[in-house]
Amino acid sequence: MTLFSKRLFTTGLLAAAALAAAGAAQAQSALDNIMKSKTLKVAIPADYPPYGFVGTDMAPQGLDIDMAKLIAAKMGVKVELITVSSANRIPYLQTKKADLVISTLGKNPEREKVIDFTAAYAPFFQGVFGPKNVKIASFKDLADKTVGVTRGAMEDQELNKVAPPNVDYRRFEDNNAMVAAFVSGQTPIVAASGAVAAEVMRKNPKMNAEFKLLLKDSPCFIGVAKGEDALKAKVNEIIAAAKKDGTLDKMSKQWLGKGIGDLPV
């Protein structure tokens, strides 16, 4: 073999070794990297209470933040919270800036084309809310009662489908006006998103209001990058255990004023 041939052969071996190393690195799963770095990077919201918001101590808090901390604790790693918006939360996952997205993420066919989803961990819903001392066990009980809604919102549309015809609607032009009427007692019964109502009741405990009826359910799922089956399985294992021991139900009641109900897997 000539010197040139030997060099060419050696170069080929080095190139093959480099490709093999690159392949091994690519084969390394997100779960492997998390356990190796001892850090779980989670994309969370910071402007959508009670799921995720900045507290008075300037630290993120909320249901989604508690869920991120729970998963990290069960995995035996620390959590790194990364604030995202609705627009960039999926790109953060795709570009590996985050290992998981826990940010009031709903599952739909379009999103399923680009990312994977774990089992649901929390409810996201529209409902009817009112005083604890007023019996509202079914939509029939809204007959002759005044109910506040934001004009044209999903809850306005959904309530129209199921409420009796003699409901006295008070329609407000925006969410803030509806919330102000709810807090002041002008409209003690409202149809609103669970997130909006829960935050209002959390800030105003003297209202003595509670969740009454479910209008529409759209649960929250955790986003996982495509192909990260080991990480998805691990998170599903944690979710299943937390559902079984009541942890998820407790978290939901704390932040949303409503249990988890029958969450899809």
Image (tube, rainbow, N blue to C red):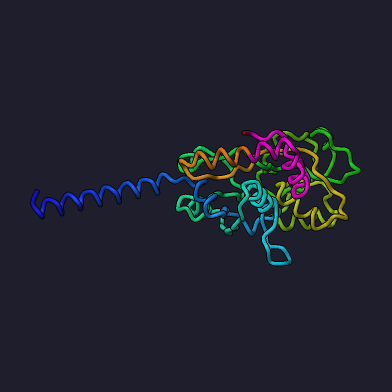
Q: Which quadrant of the structure image shows residue 122?
A: top right
Residue 16 visible, this angle: yes
Q: Quadrant of the C terminus?
A: top right
Q: Which quadrant of the structure image shows residue 49?
A: bottom right
Which SS type dominates the magenta stretch? helix
- 260 magenta-colored: yes
State the residue in front, 43 or 78.
78
Number of dots carrying numbers: 0
In x, y percent, where is residue 168?
A: 80, 43
Q: Is residue 237 above or below residue 20?
A: above
Q: Is residue 123 above or below residue 85?
A: above
State the residue in front, 71 or 115.
71
Residue at (70, 54) in percent of width and height: 62
Question: The magenta stretch spans which residues?
Answer: 238-264
Apparent side of residue 220 relative to residue 254 in the rendered image (left or right): left
Apparent side of residue 141 relative to residue 121 in the rendered image (left or right): right
Residue farthest toward the right in the current orientation of the protein: 133
Residue 169 visible, this angle: no
In x, y percent, where is residue 71?
A: 64, 47
- 159 magenta-colored: no
In x, y percent, where is residue 161?
A: 70, 34
Residue at (67, 35) in percent of width and height: 263
